[in-house]
Each structure stands twice: as structure tokens, then as C-alpha cells.
Image: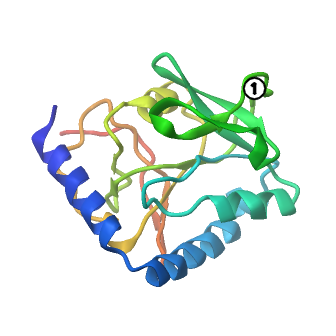
Amino acid sequence: MNSHKESVRKAVRRQRKQLEKENKRQMDEKILEQVLALPEIDQAELVYAYASTDGEVDTWGLIRRLWIKQIRVALPKVEGKELVFYIVDNFESLVSGSFGILEPEEGSLPALGISAPVITPGLAFSRKGERIGYGGGYYDRFFFKEPEHVRIGLAYPFQVQELDCVQQHDQRIHKIVTPEEVILGSGKQADNS
């Protein structure tokens, strides 16, 4: 385990917990508006998202707005060591799954959006598109198998920082959306040279 990655994870979790509720709500709303304005989202028929939890940038409002715009939403389910995305058309079809995160219930329709944009969770991002996730490698494996997806990270300003601890298997993000800006990352696999 990379100790520098772990220290970044702990620091970001601590900062997220210290966010004042109203400040967080305002930043979440600004991020939501920026995400909805992205051409990849605005023109999408299907968006892969995730069920936000534990102080993450709120994705529930985004999911609602996508449904209002008649854009289908798929959420991940952990199956073994892999993520599999399933179509979700209401919040009642979610159940508590791996790590206590809400996921699609049994019998949900698998998502087959070959080029669907993926709203990607992360604890820290660099301006080059490097990402530190939660340490399970699920999204890295998913993007390695399905590299054609546009990867979009959502972040509070303190989550965007220089990262010198990415590894060869770490998959990069194409865009990072903060309350103030949309950062264009490289979206390529990490290059440690």
C-alpha cells in the first residue's frame, strides 16, 4: 500500500468532514450546473454515475436532473472484483450493497453504453487527470477494460492537488469539475516516466 496515497486519502476525508453544510450545498449546486452544461452530458442518452456517500460531491441531484432531461442513468454494482453498471430509473430500486453503498437491486437491466460518460468518484485529482480513489481499484479495472468512456470527476477545490503517488495501473480522468472550473485532464493511463 502506498503510504503517500493513504495520507492524501485521510487528509481529504478530514477536509470533507469539516465542510460547513451550507458551503457544501452551494458547491454541490455549482458543480451540478457545470456538469449538466458539459456537452458529453447534455447530449448523452445514458450516463454512468455513482451513489454519493460520506461527504462526497452530491450526485443525487444530478441523477434527478438527468432523469428530468430524459437521460438514462446507470449505477455500479460490485460483482467480485469488478464494477458492473445497471440502469436505474428510480431511487426505490436501490439497495445497500458492498461497503454500504446503494446499488441497483437484483434483476436490474445491465447498461451497455459503450461510449457513455462516467461520473467517477475520487478523493483527489491532479490537473493532469491523475486520480486517487478509495483504494479498491474498481474504477481503474473498469476503465482498463472499457477505455472509450469519457471520465468525469467531481471535486471540491481542496481535492485538486499535485499528486506524485500515482502508479502505472491508475487510470486518468478526462475532466474534473469543481465549483469554479472544468479542468481538462489527459484521460490516459498514468505515465511514471
Residue drawn at x 49%, y 53% as measured from the top left: 53
Which quadrant of the structure image shows residue 147? Answer: top right
The percent position of residue 162, horizontal first and vertical second, equals: 22, 61
Q: Residue at position x 27%, y 39% from top?
A: 191
Q: Which residue was labeled with disc 1? A: 110
Question: How far across and how far down the image is residue 63, in percent?
Answer: 71, 57
| Of residues 172 and 49, the one drawn nearer to the viewer in this rendering | 49
Q: Please identify the residue farthest to the top as the structure is shown.
A: 80
> In percent of the image, x 31 and y 39: which residue is there?
190
Using residue 96 as the reference point, say whether residue 156 is left or right of it. left
**Secondary structure of the residue carrying numbered label 1:** loop
Q: Quadrant of residue 116?
A: top right
The answer to whether any part of residue 154 appears in the image is yes
Indicate left or right for 37 with 126 as reference. right
- 16 and 65: which one is in front? 16
Q: Where 13 falls versus 34 (above or below)?
A: above
Expressed as whole percent of the image width and height from the top left, the position of residue 183 reads: 45, 67
Q: How crowded is mark 1: few (under 14 residues within 10 Å), some or many (20 or more)?
A: some
Q: Is residue 180 visible?
A: no
- Point out the image quarter for the C terminus: top left
Q: In this view, does 72 lie to the left or right of 157?
A: right
Quadrant where the N terminus is found in the figure: top left
